[in-house]
Amino acid sequence: MTTIFTKIIEKQIPADILYEDEKVLAFKDINPQAPVHFLVIPKKEIATTNDISEQDDALVGYMHRVAAKVASDLGVAQQGFRTVMNCNEHGGQTVYHIHLHVLAGKPLGWPPYTDVLKLE
Ligand code: 5GP
């Protein structure tokens, strides 16, 4: 399924691009949830974490290395950052092209949700 992220990859719509090579693209999130919030996406269309196949193992690992490299370039790697990949409705996914959120620039709370934990 083609999403708005494919349009960003193909430069049909603008984005604040932080890193790009033949495999991945990193760009600032349009609605930041932390002082630093960017996304790392594969150029290959993979809809959700559930759709990652064995042949994508290296690509998904590489996305994490790019996340750390861009965080380092932005000066936030040493203090730390959080990577998140939301999956489907309960995970809060809204764009069905996998993407690693990278959040940084302040201490991030844990757990990451604000509702009361109900175990039953
Ligand atoms: P999800 O909810 O799927 O985990 O995250 C999708 C993210 O993509 C959201 O944080 C949202 O702000 C971001 N986003 C959606 N559309 C655009 C866009 O057109 N440009 C950019 N830069 N970010 C987008």
Image (cartoon, grey):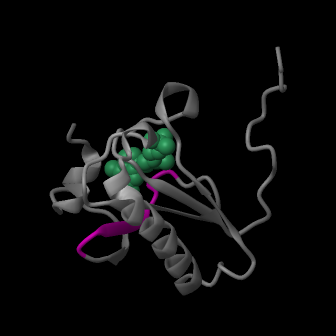
The residue positioned 53% from the left and 56% from the top of the image is 101
Task: Give percent across and percent down for residue 17.
Answer: 35, 71
The residue positioned 18% from the left and 63% from the top of the image is 11
Asked if residue 102 lies left or right of residue 17, the reply is: right
> What's drawn in magenta, residue-wise?
22-31
Asked if residue 39 lies left or right of residue 5, the reply is: right
Task: Give percent across and percent down for residue 97.
Answer: 34, 45
Which image quarter: residue 62? Answer: bottom left
Q: Quadrant of the C terminus?
A: top right
Task: Give percent across and percent down for residue 37.
Answer: 55, 62
Task: Give percent across and percent down for residue 98.
Answer: 39, 48
Q: Magenta span has 23? A: yes
Asked if residue 100 lies left or right of residue 116, the reply is: left
Q: Quadrant of the N terminus?
A: top left
Q: Magenta span has 36? A: no
From the viewer's side, name the closer residue of 86 and 74. 86
Q: Is residue 58 above or below residue 5?
A: below
Which image quarter: residue 116? Answer: top right
**Residue at far front of view:** 54
The residue positioned 28% from the left and 51% from the top of the image is 5
Tag count: 0
The residue positioned 80% from the left and 63% from the top of the image is 107
